[in-house]
Image: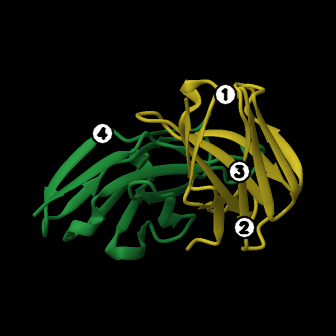
Chain colours: A yellow, B green
Amino acid sequence: ETGVTQTPRHLVMGMTNKKSLKCEQHLGHNAMYWYKQSAKKPLELMFVYSLEERVENNSVPSRFSPECPNSSHLFLHLHTLQPEDSALYLCASSQRTANTEAFFGQGTRLTVV
Amino acid sequence: AQSVTQPDIHITVSEGASLELRCNYSYGATPYLFWYVQSPGQGLQLLLKYFSGDTLVQGIKGFEAEFKRSQSSFNLRKPSVHWSDAAEYFCAVGPFAGSARQLTFGSGTQLTVLP
C-alpha cells in the first residue's frame, strides 16, 4: 500500500463510451501525475498537477481530459478512445515536482474495444 | 534534456546468484536518481533513491545502488537474488530544481529468476 489508490483496477470500454479513472492520495502531497504505460514503451508522462496548476504533455490527445478538484484527487476523463489507447494508466503523487520521489498507485488496466 | 538508458532489456539469473542492473543517465546538473520495481499488473514501488552524499545507497529488499558521476551511472545490485525478485525494474532521473517537473524513466529491465 503506497498511499495512492486508483479505481477501477480494470476497465473495458468501447470506442464511443465515456468513462473516468480516479486517483486518490492520502500522503498530503502537493503534486499528482498521470502516466501511460504501454507494452514495450517507456513510461509516458501525460499530465502533472502541482498545487492545482496543470502542466501537460502536448502530445496527449484531447480525448484524454484530466481534472484535479483538490490536492488529494485526480481524475482522467476518457471519451472516444482508440484501441491504441489500451494501456496501464498509472497515477502518482509527490511532495513537490522536484527534489523528491513519486509514489505510484497500482494502475488501471484499460482495454479499448 | 534528461534521459535514462537501461541497456539490458531482459536479464535471467539463477536464484542465489548476484545481480547487477545497469542504468546510465544524461542530465545537465545534479541528478536525483531512483530505482523502481514493478510486479506484473502492479504499480511502481520505490526501491531506493540518491539525492546527495554517500554514493552507495541502500534500499528495500536487500538492494543497493552506486552513483558514479564519472560514468553517469547508477547501477542496481543485489548479492543474492530471490525468486520473488522477478519483476521489471526501472531506473529514473528527476529534476533537482527548475521546470522539468517530471521523472524520466528508462525502458525497464525485465528480470527472470531461475530456480
Secondary structure under the numbered disc 1 in the rendered image = loop
**On the image, numbered disc 1 is attached to which residue?**
A81
Contact? badges 4 and 1 (CB < 8 Å): no
Q: Is residue B88 left or right of residue A87?
A: left
- Cα–Cα gap, marks 4 and 1: 30 Å
Q: Which of marks 1 and 2 is nearer the N terminus?
A: 2
Image: B37 above or below B2: below
Point out residue A7 in the picture as x, y percentages from the top left corner: 65, 58
- Are tags 4 and 2 found on a single chain? no
As drawn, the label of residue A33 is 3
Q: Which residue is drawn at 59% across and 61% down?
A: A105
Three-letter amino acid code at the position of disc 1:
Leu
Image: B26 above or below B60: above
Secondary structure under the numbered disc 3 in the rendered image = strand
Three-letter amino acid code at the position of disc 4:
Ile
Disc 4 versus disc 1: nearer the observer: 1
Q: Earlier in the sequence, mark 3 or mark 2?
A: 2
- Disc 1 crowd rating (10 Å Cα; few below 14, some 14-19, many 20+) is many
Q: Of B58 and B9, which appears nearest the observer?
A: B9
Q: Mark 3 lies on which chain?
A: A
As drawn, the label of residue A25 is 2
- Looking at the rendered image, the quarter that the C terminus of chain B falls into is bottom left
Q: In this view, does A12 lie to the left or right of B87?
A: right
- Cα–Cα gap, marks 1 and 3: 20 Å
